[in-house]
Amino acid sequence: MADNNHGHGEHKSFYEEGGKGIMSWVYTLDHKRIGLMYLVSVLLMFALGGLMALLVRFELLSPGKTIMTAQQYNVVFTLHGAIMVFLFIIPAVPAALGNFVLPLLLGTKDVAFPRLNIFSYYIYVTGAIIAVGAIVGGGVDTGWTFYTPYSSGTSGSVVLMVFGAFVLGFSSILTGLNFIATTHKLRAPGMTWSRMPLFCWGIYATSLIQVLATPVLAITLLMLIIERVWGVGIFDPAKGGDAVLFQHFFWFYSHPAVYIMILPGMAIISEIIPTFSKKAIFGYKAIGMSSVAIAIIGFLVWGHHMFVSGQSQFASMVFSFLTFLVAIPSGIKVFNWTATMYKGSITLETPMLYALSFLFLFTIGGLTGLFLGALSVNVHLTDTYFVVAHFHYVMMGGTVIAFYGGVHYWWPKMTGRMYNEKLARLACALVFIGFNVTFLTQFVLGSKGMPRRYYDYLPQFQTLHQVSTVGSWILGLGFLIMVSYLLASLKVGALAPANPWGGLTLEWQTSSPPPLHNFEKQPNTKIGPYDYGVPIPPKKPGTLEGAVHGTSS
Amino acid sequence: MAQAVDDLKHTHEHEEHPWFFHPHFTDVEQQFDTAKLGMWTFLATEILMFGGLFVGYAIMFSMHPEAFHAGHHHLNVNLGVVNTAVLIFSSLTMALAVRSAQTSNKRGIVINLLVTIACACGFLIVKYFEYSHKWHEGLLPGKFYTFAEGYVPHIETYFALYFMMTGLHGIHVTVGIGLLVWILLRALKGRYSSAYYTQVELVGLYWHLVDLIWIYLFPLLYLVS
């Protein structure tokens, strides 16, 4: 700790400078505090949604009733899906990590509109209370997609739940708007677009989608509310509406929303891999541009959710073709990350382990997406566990794994403490194994015809279901360990040096945790974010219980 | 001497940080550009939100054209024309208010804002008479449609769209009035000049969008045939 001259001793951190007490958080305009409040909120939601997932898996341990009725089961899986999508995964990376890290990476003091930022957090909290209250209080059994005409007729508090999602949308829009303005106008002097860290490119592409797609969801949900309250027939065929119209509207948002979820995950991976390979990123422009390409193509593929919903064959063919196009920028990214590692000085600290898990799991998720994008195979696999497995490989194996990689990567910067590296590696291994046990089996279940969302199943599926449920327990154990050592690090963790991983992006040029205005002096943008090997040696790692620069050096 | 240095320092600081300047920006110009970009982005989200309604309108119209023909006969085209003219005129006065702010003409800002607010209120009053007329006749959306004569199937869907589109627009007009009153009060305090007129300009952009949306709503709802 003696040579830790960027740590606590010298400067005050934003924790001390911004004042003490609960009110200093409630009224804060500091992007770092807002990011941390988002982080705590989304982690709580992840815990709640995860608990629901464990309940769903437990119920499926045996055919027929295990612990709950069919109606309760419908409510629980709706709760799981809606919470994970609207309350966890959409805000997780952009609003929590993005808020904390984006201004640091850009070398600026704050986001463009700090008041809008805290406002969007309170909108999020309001929406979360409404949405969770609706499902817990009234019970919503529509699934997170709210398909009409079921959702326009079923009892339960659909209106309240939909209103909650509507409110949450505004939070997402305002965050996106804020980040777009920040990225355009507030970059540090010398940081041109082509010198921006790739995390910023990923968040920028995400923000574009948030701003352009979410309003359409807002109006769709509003129409659904009106449909129920006024008894109008826009989506209900019995009243002269068009049920497929709802699906078009819904997926016009919700497919791009899939990229709102995965692009920030990819953005994190683009930071972790060069840092732990100590090598310039391979194909900077290709990775940056492929984020934007995914954002644009992502708007044109929503129809692949409706191959069996009665849209015309021609439309299906076009959507299928466009869906295959998404594979190109995604492939570009995966190949470039791999090429970055080639001949790098790779060290396997926890964030890197998550990044490697991401590469492995996201590739499986992406490739199985091609099965589903192919028209003929899709007919067989639609609405089976194959789909469930596919999107969990992309969303959880991709985004959630990348999110936890990011949490571990920036944890020292956010809290000023190091976590226990050994436990962190153990948790990562458990999550990786548990995840594969849970969801690899579901590919098999799905290809054998097990339909998704079903409460009951044929006896021949039982073994695979049981394996999957055991996998969910391993997964749960991994997260439990993660929570415990992360919380423990706040009390007993060693103080973090300014740059524990030897990264070159700007956030490592300031103390851990940073001061209120992020940088004591104008950060140096003369070195590019990935100029490893340029003769400026990475900072000497701290002397901290083997937590930094572990195995291979 | 010390006093003089202090004064100098004070003036210097004053130049560096005028009252409207937020210190996380580098300079006033950057702050203005950022605010403007934010507003344009917000307007894009507004267009997409109304865009969803327009698509819903287009699909419903293609499915039930006869209901839309029948429905629009119940609207008063004259009132629609009056409201369109009022809003277009208010866009002119809004633009003049922005121009007055840019040229530090306080009287000009106040008068033009007052006229704009009056136009906006006039628009809502006309809308109120149109709504209450339909309320009494039972020309209402969905299950509330009770108008007996000449029922055309799905006419209640036309009225659902009518109320949703004009209602959402009306909410935007109401918010606009709030914003206009807010900048009017600040203009009276002499806050705006050629050095700082961001808020006037941004409210102006918003107001033009509200007008623009009405210009699309009017033919779609009143003149459809």
Image (cartoon, rainbow, N blue to C red):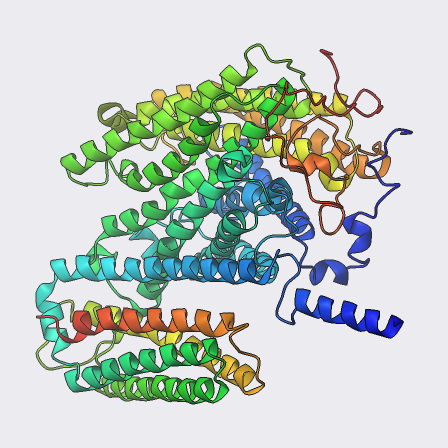
- In this rendering, position of residue A402 left or right of residue A258: right
- Front-most of residues B54 and B24: B24
Residue at x 44% of width, y 41% of height: A205
- In this rendering, position of residue A301 left or right of residue A504: left
- Front-most of residues A306 and A102: A102
Q: Horizontal and vertical percent for residue A518? A: 71, 47
Residue at x 19% of width, y 41% of height: A311
- Front-most of residues A108 and A276: A108
Residue at x 49% of width, y 46% of height: A72
Report whether residue B43 is seen. Answer: yes
Determine whether A253 is above or below B158 in the image.
above
- In this rendering, position of residue A139 left or right of residue A538: left
Q: Horizontal and vertical percent for residue A256? A: 38, 42
Q: Residue A471's quadrant in the figure?
A: top right
Quarter of the rendering occupied by the C terminus of chain A: top right
Q: Residue A321's quadrant in the figure?
A: top left
Q: Horizontal and vertical percent for residue B195? A: 55, 72
Quarter of the rendering occupied by the N terminus of chain A: top right
Q: Residue furthest front?
A: B1
Q: How many marks?
A: 0
Report whether residue A154 is seen. Answer: no
Q: Horizontal and vertical percent for residue A386? A: 38, 26
Q: Residue A126's quadrant in the figure?
A: bottom right
Q: Residue furthest right?
A: A2
Determine whether A379 is above or below A166 in the image.
above
